[in-house]
Amino acid sequence: MEKVRVSDLTKIRTGKLDANASSEDGKYPFFTCSKEPLRISTYTYDCECVLVAGNGDLNVKYYNGKFDAYQRTYIIEDNSNGKLYIPYLYYFMEDYVKELRKQAIGGVIKYIKLGNLTEAVITVPSIDRQKEIVEVLKKVGNILENYSKKLCQLDVLIKARFVEMFGDVKDNPHNYEIFLIKTLLKSCEAGWSANGTQREKKDNEIAVLKVSSVTKGYFIPEECKVLDDQANIKKYVTPEKGDLIFSRANTREMVGATAVIMEDYPLLILPDKLWKIKFKSSVNVFYMKYVLSSKSIRNEFSAASTGTSGSMYNVSMDKFKSIKIPVAPIELQNQFADFVRAVDKSKVITITTLKKLTFIRNICYNNSKDF
């Protein structure tokens, strides 16, 4: 089968708009570097394409229709005279994004250049074979989507139970006493920004976590980079059972993402963008997670964050500590925590299944393209 550069089969351009060009009630999708598209009232493009975020998360999307795009979003269209099936390119790029993340450069916000895309080499079977591969991957993808929805439903169940027990955090209908976050902390410590490589971690190697290890609301230890220098570690902050990990830097809507740690991870260290939080005995870590995850408090984190980029905003520790929250009686907090633990058993099973399905999907792609 023929192997060619992506640039030999496609036309690649970038969007032209700033990230703040969106309109909430817009008719068309507006693709930025975030995983979920925003909305916009006008469109510039009307085509079938693959979209690759040029900085930040470096995610990949497929779209066919009218849309607009942020200036750091790459738009890849077919220019192959019938040799390339665009959905096949989407699955290739979805797999290749791991390599793009290794190639990304920059300081706080990693980014790729046009050459990272144009020089990618893709295996090109016949159009019919490409379509067969896509159908297989779609079926696996649909199963993945169903399990992802189940995971979301379990999280909605926990949030509904929280509101049932404590009411809306902003309204505080039970008139719980209000505390500054700083008065509830035993400790709050940032990690260290270390250089690492995105690859499979070997036994006894030390790796630094990525912000994406907590953005889904639960801890993903595989979201890490193996330290390039295993000996000279300037700051050793590891996630331990009972900690709350807090993302102080992310896209504006994702600043303040949290995850509770369920076991010790002595070979993982936190970067400076993640904080390790331990609470005093007056609050339960599960209660605090869902208070801090509530819409009103997340909005406060977002409002308190600073940054000029469309991809990365930061909230300072002082501003975090100065936010006020209601604190329910510890007995009720513990009851809620028991409920969360019960639901989490189902979440663990679902997450494990998702990981296995993702692995199977990758095998399906890598095997099928060689036949």
Image (cartoon, rainbow, N blue to C red):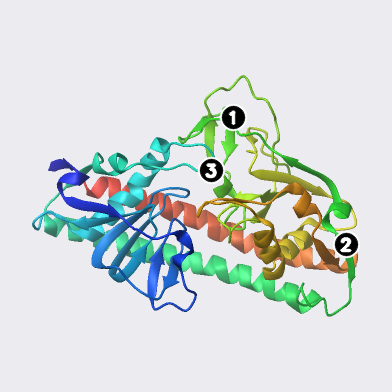
Nearer-the-camera pick, 245 or 44? 44
Q: Please, what secondary structure does the residue beneath circle 3 have?
A: loop
Name the residue furthest top. Answer: 231
Q: Earlier in the sequence, mark 2 or mark 3?
A: 2
Q: Quadrant of the N terminus?
A: top left
- Residue under label 2: 179
The amino acid type of the residue labelled 2 equals Phe
Q: Please, what secondary structure does the residue beneath circle 1 have?
A: loop
Q: Is residue 195 visible?
A: yes
Is there CB contact under 8 Å for labels 2 and 3?
Answer: no
Q: Residue at x 65, y 39 (%)?
A: 272
Query: Where residue 87 appears, x then y in whole percent?
Result: 25, 60
- Judge whether 161 appears above or below 123 on screen: below
Nearer-the-camera pick, 88 or 313? 313
- Residue under label 3: 222
Query: Where residue 283 appears, x then y in whole percent?
Result: 85, 58
Q: CA distance from mark 2 to mark 1?
A: 37 Å
The image quarter in which residue 62 lies? bottom left
Q: Please, what secondary structure does the residue beneath circle 2 have?
A: strand
Residue 206: give its label.
1
Q: CA distance from mark 2 to mark 3?
A: 35 Å
Q: Residue at x 88, y 66 (%)?
A: 178
Query: Where residue 27 appears, x then y in whole percent?
Result: 39, 78
Judge the density around disc 3: few (<14), some (14-19), many (≥20) Cα neighbours within 10 Å: some
